[in-house]
Image (spheres, coloured by chain):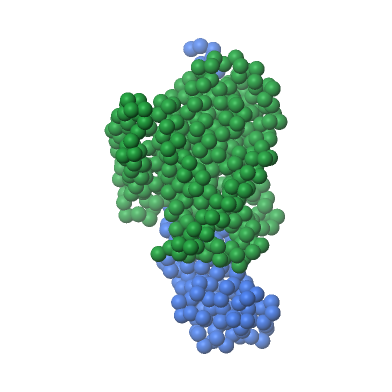
Amino acid sequence: MPDLFKLVLQLTVILAVCRIVGSLFRRIGQPRVVGEMFAGILLGPSLLGWMAPGLSAYLFPPASLGFLNALSQIGVVVFMFLVGLGINPKELKNHGHAAVLTSHVSITAPFVLAAFLALYLYPRLSDDSVSFTNFALFMGSAMSITAFPVLARILSERDLLGSRLGTIAIACAAVDDVTGWCILAYIVVLIRSAHNTTSIWLTIGGVVVFALVMIYGVSRLLGGMEVSFHKWGGLSENRLAFMLLLVFAAGLCTEWLGLHLLFGAFMMGAIMPKEPKFVQYVLDRFETITVTLLLPLFFAFTGLRTNIGLVKGAEMWMYCGLIILVATAGKLGGSMVASWLSGMPLRESAGLGTLMNTRGLMELVILNIGLDIKVISPALFSMMVLMALFTTFMTTPVLEMICPDRILRPELAKIPAKEASLPGSVIESTGGSAA
Amino acid sequence: MSHINRNFIIAYALLVALPVVGLIGVLKSGRTLTAPISVDGLWQLRADPIQLASLPCGRLLTNNPDTALAISQSGKNFTLSVSNGPKSTASGAIEGTTLKASLIPSSTSSAEAGCGDNRGLSLVATVDPKADPRTLVGVLSVNDCPSCASVAFHAVRQAPPTKKGSH
């Protein structure tokens, strides 16, 4: 049984610290989510545990963390559903070759650079229970991810969702996230099947069948919900509960198949109808409790697992710097070069690269999976969390520096109102959900 | 084929297809790399309790018959904690199959563990990589105490971390 007093005390402290730090970060022009990620680190062994070990041990005794983790995971499951909900695969079609090339390069460039970096880091930060292939593939997928919701939030705050830069960035981020999660699914299957009695082919076959059932079966069921929404102007509590039930059932299926709960939840969101009003309605119903209560728990839990004290000595900090450098060069550099070659002006290309370099919360989700399946070590986890914080933090000031609003505004004005409003209305709300 | 399509195909081949080929090469060449031996997990400790009790700081490990060493590994470095014992922290390093660590009690646990000021236990052990589950054989000695006897110990990894794939 959980110690209820301790659990509620933990929730109170986490919410208070996250709100305060989030508000402070808002004052310096950063999205609230960056502050909340930072707050999680402050509550962990990196600061509270280091400065006040007694208080830290009282507030977060190891035995109590299981309950905190369970609550935070429920939050992440719903959050992944919301992320999937905000992604519209059809968006990429509207942007032609430039977006296709940019999105694919923004995956391959950081992926390949991360694999090269893995050659150097594997003998230093891993151990012989992890194969090099798994290590390199995980590093690649962790570095090629883009924080779709944070990116949408930054674009929304700067009123750039309807700009060419904004729409291409959103489309590329959607492709990156779907691809990144597919690659991660493959790695999780590989790693878990190595110690499961279930054959890897059975798992892969199960996942394919699951995907087909979701795309051709469940999505039609959800189409009925959209019809009902338009007919009655909303969804009954029963229908919303059924939707949530489907999210958890999909998560349970992927977990049972040897993947992870989050893949099912993400897929459930991805196959939802994408009509903007319907999407907005569903987001409004689910995001408040997820964003204000459950996600801060995830940030705190991640912070409790992050021990910057493990990154000690010049050598370890050099590895950390190298990770940040490679992640930024691959994502920012790759996206920038590809979009520039596709005909985008250099300054806008640099802005797109900066936006694509935002990793935020999605990175933390992936890193936690990596630590759970032990494909990365605690020290490497801490370094990657620092990289996620750094790349997310740098987005707003760097974007402001290289792409000031006065340059993008005239370009935005040329876009027809209809075209500019469509993606924004869907994505803005998801961005808001993360921030 | 239009001019735009041709340029797109060339750019795609150079920026996407070529790096993917490079990735395959990296994955192949990386298979020859070796990482430090895995010691991560919980190790059940076996040592003579009488000898341990006579050792200054020995109570760091003898308070409970179910004493286990919890090792959290990050490459060549690891941190170590004693479950069910007085609070202590330890960090160490792995060289080949040899582990070296220093176990220091926290200031509040130092008296409980029978340690003097700035004293702690030093652990030197060798891992048998072929044993399944893996085993550790080594000695515990008191830091800065040449006259203190060392105590031999043997540890077995209780729940080895799941096999995370093969080479």
- Give the residue displayed 59% in from the left and 56% down from the top: A43
Residue B35 visible somewhere in the drawing: no
* x, y percent for residue A68: 47, 56
Q: Which residue is more in the foreground, B42 or A20?
A: A20
Q: In this picture, is B63 found above or below A86? A: below
Most extreme residue toward the top is B2
| Residue A265 location, quadrant | top left
Q: Which residue is more in the foreground, A379 or B138?
A: A379
Q: Which residue is more in the foreground, A88 or A318?
A: A88
Q: Give the chain coloured blue.
A: B
Q: Give the chain coloured green.
A: A
Q: In this picture, is B141 found above or below A401? A: below
Q: Which residue is more in the foreground, A325 or B96?
A: A325
- Give the residue displayed 54% in from the left and 24% down from the top: A167
* x, y percent for residue A65: 48, 60
- Give the residue displayed 55% in from the left and 69% down from the top: B81
* x, y percent for residue A405: 67, 25
Q: In this picture, is A327 found above or below B111? A: above
- Give the residue displayed 65% in from the left and 28% down from the top: A350
Total numbered badges shown on the rendered structure: 0
Residue B21 appears left or right of A351: left
Q: In this picture, is A15 found above or below A423? A: below
* x, y percent for residue A288: 48, 41
| Residue A89 location, quadrant | top left
Residue B123 visible somewhere in the drawing: yes
